[in-house]
Image: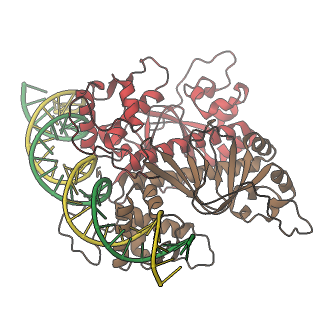
Chain colours: A brown, B red, C yellow, D green
Amino acid sequence: MHRPLPIRPASAHDHGPCSSCDARAQSVCSAIEDRDLARLAEVAVVREFGKGETFIEEGDPARDFFNITRGTVKIFKLLHDGRQQVTGFAGIGHFLGLAVSDTYAFSAEAIEPVQLCRFSRPKLREVLHDFPALEQRLLETACNELVAAQEQMLLLGRKTARERVATFLVARCRNTLPCTQPAEHVALPMTRSEIADYLGLTIETVSRTLSRFKLDRRIATPSNNEVIILDRAWLDSTAAGHTPASAISGVSRHSDRPAATIRS
Amino acid sequence: MHRPLPIRPASAHDHGPCSSCDARAQSVCSAIEDRDLARLAEVAVVREFGKGETFIEEGDPARDFFNITRGTVKIFKLLHDGRQQVTGFAGIGHFLGLAVSDTYAFSAEAIEPVQLCRFSRPKLREVLHDFPALEQRLLETACNELVAAQEQMLLLGRKTARERVATFLVARCRNTLPCTQPAEHVALPMTRSEIADYLGLTIETVSRTLSRFKLDRRIATPSNNEVIILDRAWLDSTAAGHTPASAISGVSRHSDRPAATIRS
DNA sequence: AAATGAATTTGACCTGGATCAACGGAGTGT
DNA sequence: ACACTCCGTTGATCCAGGTCAAATTCATTT
C-alpha cells in the first residue's frame, strides 16, 4: 500500500522528483519554476492505488490535496440508498480536493491503477503563500471546472439520452490529449455503469444508445473500452442539441421535439 | 439605463461608496480593508437592470466581472432549440463572471430589479495583484460554487421530482440569511418556469409537486412567490433521498424504489 | 480448453414525468 | 368594469427511458 517513490534517472541539474514528473506539463505544478520545484517535492508524498480503491470518502475530514500523475479516478457523490452521481473523471495532471470546507464534499475512486501526489493542507498552504503564481493557477483550474460543471448541468437537466451519450463521446475525444492515437479514437477506461452514473442514465440505456450509434455507422467499437468515431459531424451536432431524433434507420412520425421547456 | 450612484450619507471617515455598500459584508469585497476600499471603488461602475434584462450573454466576449448589490439574477445556458438550464440563482454579494476563457460560458438575466458593480477585467486584475487576499477570497468562492455545482449534478442526475423540489425548498430556506423572516418562511423571487429550468423539470411537474406538498401539509403557500415550511424534518429527509415515495395520502402498492442505479 | 463470474447486450414491459389542453386568478392598461 | 396577457393549476394522455429478466461476451483462473 505504501510504495517508495520510483527511482528515475536524474539529470545533471535535477531539482528533485517533481522536475521529471510526467504530469507536470498538464498540471498546476507547471506554474512553479524549475529551481523552486524542490520546495514542492518536499511537501509531496507519492501514493499508488489499485482499481476500485476509494482514497477520498465524502464527509471525511479534508486533510489532503491530490494531484494525479498516472491513471484515472472517478469523482462521485452518493445518496443514502446507493444512487450514485459521477460528477467527473479526473486524469493525469488533475488537481483534487479543492474545497474550503473541512470535510470532503465528494468521494474519489481509482478506476484503473493510479499514482498521485498527496499534499497536506497546511503544507500546501505554505507553498501557496510562497508561490502566488500557483494560487492563480488554482483559481484558473477552479474556474475551468466550474464551466465544465455548468455544461454538465445542462446535459443532466435538459439533454436526451442520445444527446448525452454523443456529448460524452465528443468530449472524451476532445479531452484526449494529442497522443499516440488519432483523434477519432476514444479510450473509455470506465465501465458502462460509471458512464451511466456520469450521464444520469442507466447501464441499459447507455448500452442501447451506443448500439444504436453503431448500427447507424456513427461509431465503431473494436473492443468494450474503446470507440472509434466515424461520423464526427453528426455526433457534434447531436451533442449540441440539433438532430431531431431521427437517424439513418427509423422514420420519425411524431411531432419530434426533444423533451424540454421552450419559451420566449 | 445609466443611472448615477445613489447618494448616501457619508461618515466622517468615509472611504468612498464601497464602504457603505449593502453587499460588502456578504461579498468577496470584505477581503479588503476599509482604508483600501477607495481603490476598489475607483474601478467599480454601478449599474442597474430591470426585471427580464439580460446583461451577460453566453458567447459574448467576457469583458467584465460583476458583483450583485441588490436583487436576484438567474444564471443559465441555452440549447439551440430553446431548452434552458438554469445553473444557479445569484443574490446579494454574489460574484459573477469568473472564467478564464475570453467569452462568457453562460447568460445572466435579472429576475427582479438588480443593482450591481461592474469591474473591467484588466482593472480588476490590477486590484487583484495589489490585494492577494482578494484573490484568496475568489478562490474560496469558486470552490464553494464547485461544491454547490456537484450537489446540483446529483440532484439533476439522480433525484426524483419530489426530491428535487424538496431540496430546492430547504436550500432556499438555508440560503436565506438571518433576516426579518423566520427561517420557515421562504421567498421565491423566481417564476415556476425558472424553478423548473433550475431543477430539470417542467412547469407542470413543479406545480403538481408543490400542490402535493401543500395537500400533505408539508408546506403552505400564502402567495405565489412565498412558501412556509410546515414539516421541515420531512422535507430534509426527502431532499436527502430517504422517504420511499409514500406520503400521508396515497398508498404505495409497488416495489417503491426511486429511479436509480443501485450497486456495490 | 473448461469453468467461473463479472460486464455488457438485448428484449419485454412499465411508469414517472413530459406533453397537450383547458381553465382560473392576478395584474395592468384603458 | 372590461379586455387582455401572463402565470399558475389541474386533468387526460403519451412516451423516453427505467425496470425486470434473460442471454451473450469477456476476462481470468484452473
The residue lying at 65 percent from left, 26 percent from top is: B16
Rendered view: B173 above or below A197? above
Q: Is residue A144 left or right of residue A230?
A: right
Query: Residue A137: percent from the left, percent from the top?
Result: 69, 52
Tell me residue B180's x, y (percent).
44, 17
Quarter holding residue B203: top left
Frontmost residue, A48 versus A71: A48
Q: Quadrant of residue A102?
A: top right
Residue closest to the far right = A12
Residue B133 is situated, as x and y percent measured from the top left of the image, at: 71, 36
Q: Would residue A258 be seen by someone viewing this image from the given angle?
A: no
Q: Is residue C10 above or below residue D18?
A: below
Tally of numbered tags:
0
Q: Quadrant of residue B75?
A: top left
- In percent of width and height, residue D25 lies at 42, 77
Viewer-proximal residue, A69 or A98? A69
Is residue B257 at all visible to an observer of this figure? yes
Quadrant of the drawing holding the N terminus of chain A: bottom right
Q: Residue at x 64, y 42 (%)?
A: B139
Tell me: residue B49, above or below residue B24: below
Residue at 53% x, 55% y is A88
Furthest residue in direction top, as rendered: B12
For the residue pair A139 and A43, the one nearer the viewer reads as A43
For the residue pair A129 and D20, the one nearer the viewer reads as D20
User: Residue at (63%, 52%) from the top-left corner?
Assistant: A141
